[in-house]
Image: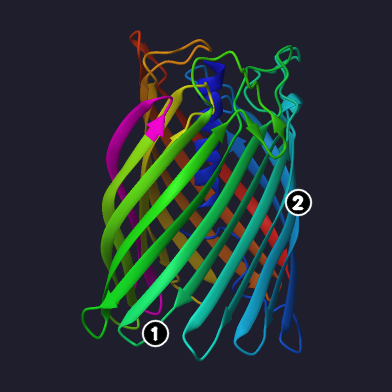
Amino acid sequence: MLKQKMISRSVMGLCAGGMLFPFCAGAQYSPGIKLNGLTISPYVNLDWSLDDNILYSHRKVSDNIWRVNPGVDVKYTGNEWGVAGNLWYAHSWYAQHDVKDIDRWGERLSFYRQSEKGIKIVLGQGYTESDQNDSLLLTDGDGVWRSRRQLDANAVLTYAPSDRMEASIIAMFSDMWYDNAPDKYQSLYGWSTWSLGAEVAHKLTAKTMFMLSGSYQEYYTGENLFGKNFKDNNLPYSNTSHGYTLMGGLRSLLTERIRYRASVGASLYDYGGNTSVAPSYLLDATWVISDKLAATVAGAGYFQPSERSYYQQKTIYTISAGMTYQPVKKMSLTLDGVYRGEDNQTVDGYSRYGGRDYQRDQYTGRFRVSYRLQRYVSVYGAAEYTYQEANYSGNRKDDWDRFRLTAGLSLRY
């Protein structure tokens, strides 16, 4: 039960961060400090939230949460190259359940270079760390959340030999680590993955290209860069799994206001000696309807290991859609919805660590408004509602809903 809520919390973290629109009030209004191609933009967000379900459970517990979030954005543009970075910190205070107070920090860095010969390189890297001492031994603790670290890196090399052909090599790495202590927490399993793939694109029309892509992935459960997460060498299966993905699709710049990229195909996942095949897709589309209104759709379908138990695999499907409206220059309104589905399966019914098959569906709706009071100061408010349906083997359910209301102040130079 506690580990199941842990994964729900991870899903909600993704939703809160915004799959479609960056919820950083005021970012579009302040130019920052400019020095010969370098732009530095420091900021701080201060907000209050009322959350009616801080445990993500049918047993609702509410609390008021205060948060401070300073950070800085940096960007430099050179001749045919550029670099951008972000460094941030956040601390949240819970008014009644202070055991859930959270410290978080992270950074992200990206680099690109392109040449007249049709070669382009894009590199990206990000790191986040969260610390919350939500132990079972503490008053009001439920053992659901604990320290974790996540590292991501990617590289893309693209070559266009002509105006009709384009080829890319894509490499990615990700590592997730959880702080585990059997006397304090329910166990979770960190994992790392790397992948290598290629994509070939051919121009069909002046504005449309056909894409064919394939990739190979390896996953390691229980041992990674940051330490071991309950690796057990006596288990009957290896902690390494493999994946293969093949997709085809279209990408287009229909007009200056409409862009899309859509691919569909299949993924094969080999985990614990079992092989599964499932549909795979990627979708990213933007439509600037007018100078005041824009719409976005995004989605993905993929496999990954389970964080809750060895010898489990998850098939994940997501889709999100939203709109941003700017009725006046100083005001921005955003409305979006997110769906995430998970199908978790044990390998050969193996559940030595309490694993079980389950299906989970989460639906989230969000509304946000921001208003610029003056050049460097904005205020914002948001409302978010989530509903989950989950069915586990053994006829057990884990259904709940959650509402969160937020109001805040953003200062950005």
Q: Does 56 appear above or below 17?
A: above
Identify the image quadrant of residue 44.
bottom right
Write the start and end of the magenta stretch as one range: 270-295
Residue designated by label 2: 89
Helix, strand or loop at label 1? It is loop
User: Compared with residue 205, is residue 61 higher up or lower down, i.e. above or below?
Assistant: above
Horizontal and vertical percent position of residue 210: 26, 71
Q: Amino acid at mark 2?
A: Tyr
Say which of 172 and 322 sits in front.
Answer: 172
Identify the image quadrant of residue 395: top left
For the residue pair 50 and 98, the one nearer the viewer reads as 98
Circle 1 Cα neighbour tier, 10 Å, few/some/many (<14 / 14–19 / ≥20)? few
Q: Amino acid at mark 1?
A: Pro
Colour setup of the view: rainbow
> Magenta: predominant secondary structure element?
strand
Whether residue 341 can be seen here: no
Residue at the spot x=35%, y=83% of the render? 256
Above or below residue 158? Residue 81 is: below
Relative to residue 255, is residue 41 depicted above or below? Answer: above
